[in-house]
Image (tube, rainbow, N blue to C red):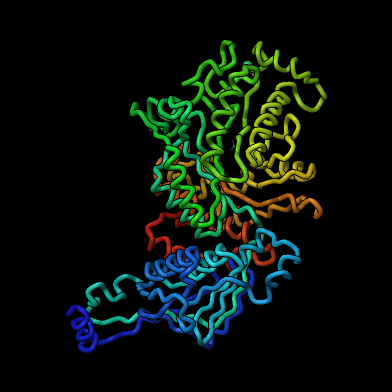
Amino acid sequence: MKKIIIVLLAICLPVSLWAQTADYRVIPLPKNVSTDTARVFRLSTGMGIAYDAADAEMTRNAQFLREWIEELTGIQLQMTPDDKKAAIRLALGLPGDKKGRKAKKAAPLTPQQQEAYTIAVDDNGIAIAARKHVGLFRAAQTLRKALPVVPPQKRVSEKGLTDGGAFHKVEIAFPFATIQDEPRFEYRGAHLDCSRHFFKVAFIKKYLDALALHGCNQFHWHLTDNEGWRFEVKALPDLAEKGGWRECSPLRRAGLWDDVPYGGYYTQEECRELIRYAEERYINIVPEIDMPAHIQSALKVYPNLRCDVQNVRGSDQVLCGGNPETMDFLKTVFSELCDVFPSPFIHIGGDECPKGGWQRCPKCQAKIKELGLKDDGKHSLENQLQTWMNRELASFLKERGRDMIGWDEILEGGLTEGGLVMSWRGTKGGIEAARQHHHVIMTPTDFCYFDYYQLKDHDRQPNAIGYYLPLTKVYSFEPLDGIPEEEQKYILGVQCNLWTEFIGYPQHVYYMLLPRLDALSEVQWCRPDQKDFEDFKARLPRLKQLYDRIGVNYCRDME
Ligand code: ACM
Ligand code: ZN
């Protein structure tokens, strides 16, 4: 009956065609896009999307694409597995790739090559091909961003009715095209501090969606800091139960200090749920437990782990490097962290550790003696003690098949074998680490700290930590500047950091993130010769329409 009414309405009411064109010049810009705008393939409701029904991962990616097309345009596609004539067809295998024994003999694929995909649009429709499922996902995201956003009032509503009495048929014209794409860097990350402010699992999922939209494949999850311990450790239940809470709001510096207790933590089950969610979006979660500083939330629960000295206050309080219980504590924590997170790298923090307490602490000084650490004129004894802790943890992680990552301070006491360096105090730490043949992730404050203001006029913006990082500056970052060619292979990639001292709500997080992540995604994905800020700026409005459609905030001004 319902169908009959719709058909009758379609016959009786004036039918108008709402046709718009897809634009493949999305953000980040694919490596090669060649289009023939004179010829188009038209997509509309009722057409099919084909995939291998025996392949669950491909099915999931086909479903993602179907949902995204409906969300942005209202066009409803049928899931038509194995239909060779379907309008959109997903398949594994790239033309020209070797198969069987020949493939085994060929040079192994780089991680970037494993993400490669092609999209071909012609009379037969849209053919997506990729070496691996991740490539199908990347291709689906490219098509999603290529879509025009059809205003809801222009769509046929559920009842088949229309706005203003007109019956709209939505049709998207896809110009004939060949697209070939793969990313520049293998590590394309974004970080979120969930200690200074706690964000619910539902929001972390949305954050992961935003990363996936930008081709990011790493989520650096800052789980602990002075202000709150967020990771459940089953052997030490008080750590999150008590260390996850503070007596009052964290917004003191913004003049918003109150007496309302604030906190929360993630259970291991919730972490596993997020890991699964991230994996379905081809994102690895890199968990960070920050030590030996930035750890007052744990010291509050286990004061015995502090140095036994007077007059060490606030964030100068750190784990005692000489107390054997410290290493037991850390191994308990990192052991459970490894049980939960499958990430090939685990972040141990290591940043901003004041050493005043260690210089006066009898246990720390005894440990320095016991280890036979000597003044080498380059690294202080206390920095060497921190390196000893890093090395202990690195070998503990290695036994579990993981590599250690640390902030660039881990260079200060001498680098740890196999350790990855996250270069945040500029790029010099990263350049030095690459010189020593260590892998590096570039995340310098000047280009990658999204807790900074993005406009000069602070009054027009929500709170930020200070400083100034406009969109243009993010876009201008070249991570390989200053790195000799033979050492460039050590730079795995780039990441933005979002510290949340002043950011307490999801829409504020999005505001700080977007559109700066759009700019960073071109640093992460595109070759330098593809980059052009004016061209990027012209491509941004379409993505902003998508943000509006999915209800995601962003900074509307641009500097
Ligand atoms: C940092 O921003 N302290 C790594
Ligand atoms: Zn000590």
How many numbered badges does the structure rendering display? 0
Measured from the top left, where is residue 525 in percent x and y? 62, 60
Side of 108 relative to 307 (left or right):
right
Q: Residue 254 sits in which quadrant?
A: top left
Is residue 407 at all visible to an observer of this figure?
A: no
The image quadrant where one finds the C terminus is bottom right
Side of 70 relative to 387 (left or right):
left
Say which of 194 and 95 sits in front.
95
Measured from the top left, where is residue 161 in percent x and y? 22, 77
Quarter, ligand 2 = top right
The image quadrant where one finds the N terminus is bottom left
Q: Identify the residue shown where x is 66% and y is 47%.
A: 442
Measured from the top left, where is residue 91 in percent x and y? 54, 73
Is residue 510 at all visible to an observer of this figure?
A: yes
In the rendered image of this protein, does residue 544 appear above or below residue 8? above
Q: Residue 287 sits in which quadrant?
A: top right
Say which of 420 and 343 sits in front.
343
Side of 121 relative to 232 (left or right):
right
Say which of 64 and 465 sits in front.
64
In the rendered image of this protein, does residue 290 appear above or below residue 84? above
Q: Identify the residue shown where x is 58% and y is 12%.
A: 308
Side of 157 relative to 534 (left or right):
left
